[in-house]
Amino acid sequence: MKKIYSFHLIFLTITFFLLYNCKKNIDTSVPANNNSISELKINQQLSDSIHNSKVDPKIRLEKADKLIFLAKSAKNDSILFDAYLKKMTLLKDLKMDDSSSKINHEIIKWANTIPDKKYLGEAYFNFGKDFYQKYQNDSAYYYFNNSKNEFLKINNKEGIAKNSINIAMILNDVSSYFESQNSSLEALNVIKDDPKHPYLTPIYNNLAVSSGSLLNYNEELYWYEKALELTDDPYYIASIKHNQGVALTLLKKYDKAISVLSSIVNTPIFYKDNGLKARVIDNLAYAKWKKSPNTDVLESYNEALNIYKEENDFFGMSTTYDHLIDYYKDINPKKSLEYANLKYSITKNSNNTEGRLNALKSIITLNPNPRNITDFITLSDSLQHINSNSKYEFAKLKYDVDANRNRVTSLSLENAEKELRLERAKIYGIIILAILVIAILSFTLYSYRIKQKRKEEKLKTIYETEVKLSQKLHDELANDLFSTITLVDSIKFDNADLKHKLIHNLDHIYSQTRKISRQNNIIDTENFKQELDFMLGSYKSEEINVLSKGIDLIGWENIEIQLKIVIYRILMELMTNMKKHSDCNIVMLNFIQEEKNLQIKYADNGSIAMDQPKFNKNGLKNVENRIKSIDGSIIFDCSKGFKAFINIPTTKK
């Protein structure tokens, strides 16, 4: 059953506080003289111009830069920080996110030079907020944590609280529900002395969400009631009531659930927000059906499903499919299985792992398949819940939630253990089959890894042999040739032309030896793009122009070292072949990164056709052999100029 989580509220709340604090800092600054008063007035005028959407954006940016300049001149940290924020806001309004990010980096650089670490904490928070809104949870968590640490150093409660809340929301997103509750309770402990603090609403909301995810539905209802007491926003009220209705349904309090959900229908917000409307229709129908299985709710399910499809809401569709699976499970198992497969398909395409596991569980129930081991995962999750419940209770006691409410929700380990025994009885057979499947998969994976390791060792040996050969050519043969040239140069010859020709030939051999040594030298795989650019550029001359396209777009850092080495050698041999056998004056290399493959297209405008004997002789056979060693493919085309189409798998099979 889908719930609505209004996580965006925290950012609105925090933004209000940030702007309020910045304004307060400016207004309460006591100017030292009339010049300071004038500066503050100018700052206010510039600030008004920056936020005036009727003014040309370029002029607004100029005003923002002037405001920053004046703020620096005034040497007032709060004014300067406010000026930076105004420019960042303007850049975001103009969809210039990269430029806005650069300003935040500038704030961090400046904040590290001043004693007050509040501004450094705010800058880190800005980055955290931006990454969270882009769904980049790992980066957001990193910056929120850095921001929190800066605020801890100066005991800034507002900063500690807002970062703890956002960290809690991220932990909820990644299903770390106990850790999320701990972080929410940490924020609650910081601001517990202010019963009307704006942060309380998002804290209560987050505690409700994590409690529901941990199947503590009474606890979830309690926190939603606390959140309702502090908000008058129509959408937020409707969202909370909807979530309450879902929790009541899960508690089998169907009459109350129907009453709460029905109270949302026909309200103005119900018709304004399609997502809310679909969820209310869907879950109201489900509550009615749970109360009376003979109730005809298909029309409501289809109405909700149509809205979800129009909105591309895959999570909502997944929930309705759950309800349809339940609806048909006993009366038409085949139809129920169809909806289970539909749910699996959309959850797979939308990367909804939890939904996909639930879909597989339904499929196993309707059509058992030993390859699907989701029940085993469910059992692991149940064990994790039991082992972590004590930590959750300890966290609530530690942050003195009992002072905020006159009760403590005690968890019954005995009841949990009974549920676990029942769960074990249901899936015992599946676990045995799952273990067998895992054993087979493990053996297959082990065999593949051994084969892959041997292949990698072979490639590594070839590379090391080439490098050793290069070093020998350089250290032994090249040095001997150089000594021979020096010796010949010191000997008197009766025939001066013969001496000159001999020295010239030896010098040519010396140069070729050095060239071969360089071609087989160690390859810098860490800076591979630059190394490849340099190698390709070395074949440029007044007669030949070498062009490359797409080389900067390839994620070289994600490609294995051995693959890089083979790619380098292949391209070098193609370029050497061109130098020796082609009369071209233009060479074009096109690099294309696909999901699992790297494509390289080589083309030159040479006019000399290449027959099979010359092909085998001139080194292109080496190119083919190298390609085969990494399971790649190459196609040669000698019809117009010379072309080579290379396809290299970049992911392990």
Image: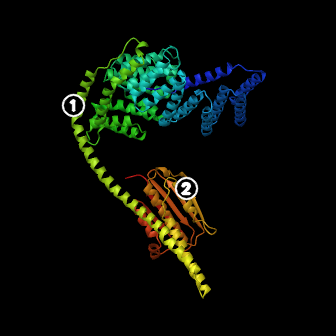
Label 1: element kind: helix
Q: Which residue is mark 1?
A: 425
Q: Amino acid at mark 1?
A: Ala
Does 524 appear above or below 50? below
Identify the residue at the far bottom of this view: 494
Side (left or right) of 37 relative to 579:
right
* Residue closer to the observer: 535 or 522: 522
Label 2: element kind: helix
**Circle nearer the N terminus (2, 1):** 1
Q: Residue at position x 24%, y 34% from top?
A: 427
Q: Which residue is mark 2?
A: 530
Looking at the picture, how far across and down is residue 440, in whole percent? 26, 47
Residue 121 visible in rendering: yes
Identify the residue at the far right of this view: 34
Work out which quarter of the rendered image holds the N terminus and state it: top left
Looking at the picture, how far across and down is residue 83, in whole percent? 67, 29
Does 422 appear above or below 374? above
Looking at the picture, how far across and down is residue 211, in whole percent? 39, 23
Side (left or right) of 506 relative to 383:
right
On residue 628, the disc is none
Does 605 appear above or below 431? below
Alpha carbon distance from label 2 to label 1? 60 Å
Looking at the picture, how far across and down is residue 543, in whole percent? 62, 69
Q: Residue at position x 61%, y 32% from top?
A: 111
* Residue closer to the observer: 280 or 157: 157
Question: Which of the 4 quarters of the picture holds residue 341?
Answer: top left
Q: Amino acid at mark 2?
A: Gln
Contact between marks 2 and 1 (CB within 8 A): the answer is no
